[in-house]
Image (cartoon, rainbow, N blue to C red):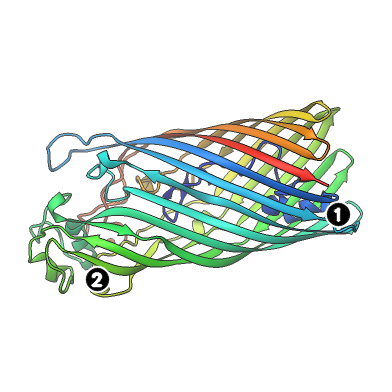
Amino acid sequence: MSLSVQAAGSFQVSPLMGGVFEGPSVASPMGIYWNPAAIGLLKGTHVYGALDLFFLRGTYDRDGFDPNTGGGYDTATWSGFGPLPKAAVTSDFGTDRWVGGIGLYVPFGGSIDYGDDDLFGAQRYHIIDAELAAIHVTPTVAVKVFPHFYVGAGISWVHTQFQSSVDVDLAAALSNVGISPDAAGAGLEDPLVEAAVQTGMLRDNSVGWELGVLWEALPELDLGLSYRSEVEVSLSGGADVAFPLFPPELGPLLSLGPVAPGSQVSTDVSFQFRWPQSVQLGATYRFWPRWTGIAILQWTNWSRFGRFESEVLTPPLSESSLDLSRARGLNDTVLLSLAVHHQWFDGFKIGGRFAYESPAVPTEFVNPQNYDSHTFELGLGAEYRLMKNLSLSLNYAHLFFAARNVTGSVFDPADPTREGYNYASGDGTYEASADKLELALEVHF
């Protein structure tokens, strides 16, 4: 999807991986990502490497009044950076039917940081900072089963790693055990009644798979269709929790056991979620001498995500009510991309792309940790053959995220009847934008 990775916050920053010359119907080593059958069009051996650089920025203006000051909330400002590498090697091994390859890519990754000025900002109960990466290593094979028709498959080893920091409102945590914060005499959003949670680097290794077909329907038209499987992830690792000088009577209500006010404890934690399955459809049409169009339609099954489950595994907090699980109300997304490129002269081509993706997060579920919006991308790219067997490409894209004004947030820290919704309200105005720069080299021999 566009800006959100529903496991951890705002990370995936582009509707499309790669530059304006890639897609499910394009002969490219990165067909390993887009469509494993597409590498069947490649002849000889190809070695490809690229680095995508993402630069994100955004603001959150929370509605309402800060109970600590009586005035409006200050604007929370965040930034993010994501250096995402890609590499692939393919070869036909001297055959005319088989092509094999292996690729490394990071379709989800990056970081988000609200900065030191927002350690006590309006967003702190959802996120302060976080870092996420899902690294795929995918061996792939494609075979020409009929003239002009290819089938491909790949198996992905997926290494996911994640770390974050967030504050937990102990008064709101009472709602997880059915106790009204007001009834317990605990004030919401009181810095003296909130714990700071900092996870270590949580890790998981999982397996997914890809299938694809490609049909050279006409001399000027190639069609590609691919499927990427769902991947279940169970992150685990350690976390440090720093407690404030909370009122001693809160300890028994939250089952904090021996944890004393003002102490810091270490514990083991786990998070469970899924990377979604998706279907990609692509068409490459050479509609005029030196002119080519590339269309992509992608469906991503985010609605399968459900809840983001967390569990504290070790004492002294394993029986406590510091549950970071939260409800997720997600929709499937649809992405449409249209690109055109022109072979300016032999060895040099330029192109442009427009893309749109629908948001996965309904308005009422938007919050600073889970921001998403209607996403529009405008991209430009150029490819130049430096030598007979060496090409360099450069791509730039700007991403526009439509501002979202949230009213009626599902999150309510004072409601003891809705487990998973006991977080600060997400009401307010969200704005964001991003820039992406990609540099790639490809050797063919």
- Numbered disc 1: secondary structure: strand
Amino acid found under the numbered disc labelled 2: Leu
> Which of the pair 367/134 is nearer the observer?
134
In whole angstroms, how far apart are the C-alphas of marks 1 and 2?
57 Å
> In the rendered image, which quarter is residue 338 located in?
top right
Q: In this view, does 388 lie to the left or right of 395?
A: right
Q: Is residue 428 left or right of residue 172?
A: right
**Which percent across, then down, holds residue 423?**
27, 53
Q: Which of 52 and 141 is in front in this view?
A: 52
Q: Name the residue type under label 1.
A: Phe
Residue at image x 60%, y 36%? 355
Please tell me whether mark 1 or mark 2 is closer to you in this view. Answer: 2
Q: x and y percent of residue 346 in the render?
A: 84, 28
Compared to 249, does 403 lie above or below? Answer: above
Tell which residue pokes out farthest to the front in this image: 387
In front here: 212 or 138? 138
Q: Mark 2 = which residue?
A: 317
Q: In this rendering, would 382 be left or right of 67?
A: right
- Can residue 430 be seen by looking at this rendering? no
Relative to residue 408, is residue 8 drawn left or right? right
Look at mark 1 in the image and give the residue it sits on. Answer: 149
Check disc 2 and report its element: helix, strand or loop. loop
